[in-house]
Amino acid sequence: MCFLCQARDPSTSTYDTHGATSFDSSGDASGASLSATLPSYSLDQVAAQLTDGYWHSTGRARRSFDAEAGDTLTFNVSQLDSTGRATAIEAFEAWSAVSGLNFQITTSTGADFVFTDDSSGAYSYSYIAGQTITQSYVNVNTGWQGYGDYYLQTYIHEIGHALGLGHAGNYNGSADFGTDAHYQQDSWQYSIMSYFGQWENPHTNASSNYLATTQLADILAIQNLYGTPTNVNTGNTVYGDNTNLAQKGMGLSTQWAVAIFDSAGTDTINLGSRSANQRLDLRDGTFSDLNGEVGNFAIARGAVIENATTGSGRDSITTNSANNNIHSGSGNDTIFGSDGNDTINGGAGSDLLAMGGAFTEYTFGCNGAATLTVNGNTTRFTGIETLTFADGTAVVGSSANGQTITFTATGADYAACRVTVDTNNSANWSAYTDTFDSSGTLLTRTTLNDDGTIRTESFVGTAYSTTATDDGDQFDWDTITYDYDADDTLLRTTTVMDNGVRRVAEYANGVATHMTATDLSDVYDWDSYTDTYAANGARVSQDMTLDNGLVVETAFSGGQRSSVTVSDAQDTRSWTSYTDTFDQSGNLATRSMQHDSGLRVDTTFDGGNRASVTVTDGGDIRTWSSYTDTFDSSGTLSTRSMLLDNGLQLDTDYVNGNRSTVTVTDNDNSRGWTSYTDHYNASGARTMQNLQLDNGLQVQTDFVGGQRATVTVTDANNERPWSNYVDTYDQQGSRVSQVMTFDDGRTVETSFSGGRVVTKTVHDTADSFFWDSAADHFDMNGARIRQVLCRDDGVEIDSAFANGIRTSETVRDMQDDWNWSSYTTTFDANGNAVQRVLYLDNGFEITTDFMEPAVEIA
């Protein structure tokens, strides 16, 4: 036991020094008479003593490294001899196996753990910042190698301190159980951090063993500090014979007491080679007695071990809630069943399977071997000679029909019932149960059929009906009654469901003709329904009345639903009825719904997806008579065609669910146009409109950013003196230009500003006139202020105007066909020429003043 512990620096370190202890089976712990008053601690309380209680008793708080399961801490054992290094590594393996921490060897002096062996005794101390361990030191003197297995236990103990665990009691250095223990569980059986061997604690019923692993309280405590690991023994682990673990003690020999933790996998305790009597408990947080010893093995809380094999001894195995696979070997063994779908093989010997419930709570069956089921959990058992239940004992035997289980209630003189299981797999039932009176006379037989139904027969008097009862409440019905006529022909079956529904099926010539279900307990949303069947047994229709007043009529064809009509019999909804039809694969094909308002909605489906919807205004209550929507394979709207009451037809196309075009057609020719089509981009903005007027004009309008950009008007019927014109507009929607093409070859280009004409230019593109072009310019009031006329002969006439009166005119000889280059005439307010200045090619300039109107020169 520990005999010295002192503090080197209260804020940073703790010393823990140990002396050797040895087994003394004859010695008693001093003060044992006082220990009878000690409280009994739960596992959580013992773990709390290790993480908090010990430190609080010295005025300190819990401590741990800043790490969690899966993280890596380093250790330096370079100062130890080879035996010390190997033992330290084994001790770290023991802690890694329950904490999920990874420990990595290093030669760095800054390692998380530094080991020495040169000081006397065994101790550890830690440097702490707040509640965080920054570095721990461990010393175990080489002289302790002479203590045998206690050498490894000491290393595990000291590393426990180095990781943050205190002692199992509030003692240090030395302790006596009678005076220093403060609860009954303070011993090595619960914690390697205890000072007391199993033999020193009068409350501990465990063999004297050194420890190769941490124990139940240590495992819980270290997981409270660093988290429950999910990375420990995650494979299909074998403990005991042929263990696949290298960790010390996992062979489960008599040398050590051990406890295990396991994160995952399908795991096995294998004791198959052993002859000692084993008491193996697979439940977590419990102790087992292995190899003829007591309390020397434990499974930690949260660990799940699924399977177990024992040897030739008289073994006891307690299962857990997992799906266990148990093989108890050749002894006379006892297996205690529990929850889970278990497979039990008693092997040779006279073996007993103990179940916790009453015999009548279990349903017997067969799945390659006899099975018993309760609460959805099935136990499959072979090699079992006796079954015990809370209310009696059953003996397992055999008959020509299979295995038998004969049950006798506690205190009874005669067997009350016998279960026969079809272990030969030669019948269409898995098991049947016979009940007997006190004289052994057969009273009833209840058969569990392979199809899962239960048939009950009475052998008292003449039976007119047979009732099958779901005694084990495995199915959704309570009873089924079969009614026969005098010739044993089935007339009717009446099924009472667990939820109160009654189903009555009528038969003719052995074939069902009708089945009516009535919801007597009002647990469903329907009141009743009736199924009708054809002569071949195929259902042809179903009529259902719902609680809400709806009537549902379903037709079937070839075993498939072909149509469903739902009628609002109580007129509580906005629709009168609807009918669904289905294709041969059972997929919805059409739906036609009639609304109270007169609307009818007809929907078609393709591959289960809506393909089209047609809505018809039968009551003429809307401004349209009908519209039809079509959808693509993904269910996105593709088109809509709508007929309005006013004679218009609207056809809309969609791309990726967005409107792309809308065409409006004047079907009754009541408007001045025939049709128009609007085009939209992916953002939904209109980009173009094509309008067809009744008078033959075609109007194409282009839009940019939602604003009209251009308007092109075309005389498609050639009824006007022009063929087309194009108006362009600025971003504010104001017209800025017009280009008009006339049939006679003229092109008129007009520019606008602020809604007024700025310029108008006429081009003789077909060369039909004596001039090539004429350009008029206008002021802000729309009055012409200038005209430039270019004639075919090369003469350009540039005229200026004021208040509608020509004020000047300049004529230029652009092709040099005349003997002058230009002349300019000015006019008075009445438009009369007052002066002309002529520029001759020879350089002369002639100025003429007029008293009378001037005469044109050319």
Image: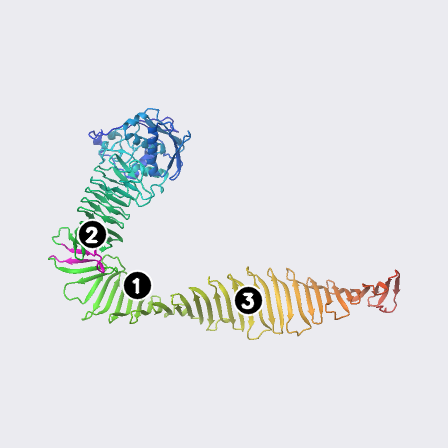
Which residue in the structure is indicated by mark 2? 358
Q: Foreground: 70 or 495?
A: 70
Quadrant showing the C terminus? bottom right
Q: Is 425 in the magenta?
A: yes
Range of residues picked out in magenta: 415-438
Q: Residue at x 27, y 49 (%)?
A: 340
Badge 2 local density, few (<14 within 10 Å), some, or many (20+)? some
Which residue in the structure is indicated by mark 1? 522
Does the image show residue 122? yes
Label 1, label 2: how far apart the Cα atoms are: 34 Å
State the SS at label 3. strand
Residue 399 in the figure: left or right of residue 806: left
Q: In x, y percent, where is residue 155?
A: 32, 31
Query: Which circle's residue, 1 or 2, is located before the other in the chain?
Result: 2
Badge 1 local density, few (<14 within 10 Å), some, or many (20+)? few
1 or 2: mark nearer the eye: 2
Q: Amino acid at mark 2?
A: Ala
Q: In x, y percent, where is residue 805?
A: 79, 67
- The reply to whether callout 1 and callout 3 are in contact (CB within 8 Å) is no
Label 1, label 3: how far apart the Cα atoms are: 53 Å
Badge 3 local density, few (<14 within 10 Å), some, or many (20+)? many
Say which mark, if any, is on residue 662.
3
